[in-house]
Amino acid sequence: MRIAVFTKKQSLRTRKEAVQLVEGLRSNGVEVYDIESAADLLPQTSLLLSLGGDGTFLSAAKRAALQGIPIMGINFGRVGFLSEFDGKEALQSILSQDYSIEDRSMLCTEVISPGGSIREIEGFWPYSLNEVTVHRSSHSVLGIEVTLDSEPLPTYWADGLLVATSSGSTAYSLSVGGPICMPDSRVLIIAPIAPHNLNVRPLIVPETTRVSLGIISREDPAVLTLDNRTFHLMEGDTLRVSLARFSLKKVRSLRSDFVNALRTKLFWGEDKRNSPENN
């Protein structure tokens, strides 16, 4: 078996838990090597280990998603919805092949110039696992014209707007008041960021919906983010967001429990009336 390791913080490679994981794999005949980019991936790589938090996992997705290599998130971060393994559990799961692989939907975003052509942006990778967002870059509110499969919605007036997958429902979407979706839900969440009116709510649509975003700005053009990557748009740019033609392969612990993760990591239902002694 051949396994790649990716981390944004090289200091994590010297952490005791990470060292024990790598040494445990190698002592059992597993070839382990480090990568920085997708170009470093070797043929017949079985897994990519992401050492860090969910932000590192999103960066790992850029390295491995197109190649179809499953990603196992080893959590050295804080919350850890995507990075759900600790080092000891990861070692045991890999050696016993005691895990499953699930498909997580990804989004593809195209930036369209006023002339109708796809804009080339340096360093642009069009795919995202959690969400696509547009933000204002000045103090002026944005107008965001949303079209769903050629059906226009009323213009949103807000600081920005996001289009999130079910994977992203516990990320930025949650912070702006979006709903929590089970990871296997095949939906997109469309939610305004700090809307400047009181009669808009997050909207859930099928993930096959093609979403077009037009931007009205009185001052500087808006900022586009794809997961944890940021780009500056130009005046007149529009966005086309659709389901990517491939999915991300996420390694899932057979003992993972999404609802329990909501309770323990986001303290969902934390209320003294819900404690066992009051039941």
Image (cartoon, grey):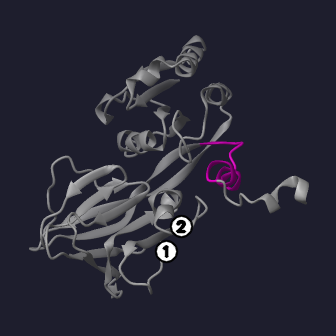
Question: Is 140 above or below relative to 260?
Answer: below
Tell me: 218 left or right of 248.
left
| The C terminus, quarter of image | bottom right
121 relative to 266 in the view: left or right? left
**For residue 137, above or below residue 262:** below
The answer to whether mark 2 and mark 1 are in CB contact below 8 A is yes
Q: Nearer the viewer, residue 276 or 179?
A: 276
SS assignment at label 1: strand
Q: Name the N-terminal-most of marks 2 and 1.
A: 2
Viewed as shown, does residue 16 lie left or right of 120? right
- Tell which of 229 and 140 is nearer to you: 140
Residue drawn at x 56%, y 48% is 81
Check disc 2 and report the residue beneath it: 186
Residues rendered magenta in the picture? 252-266
Residue 195 rendering spot, x and y as whole percentages: 38, 77
- Amino acid on which the number 1 mark rests in the picture: Pro
Dot 2 surroundings within 10 Å: few (below 14), some, or many (20 or more)? some
Residue shown at 58%/65% (left/top)? 181
For residue 104: magenta?
no
**Of residues 141 and 99, the one drawn nearer to the viewer in this rendering:** 141
What residue sits right under mark 1 in the picture? Answer: 206
Residue 220 vertical placement versus 95 (above, below): below
Question: Which image quadrant is residue 45 in?
Answer: top left
Determine the image quadrant of residue 219: bottom left
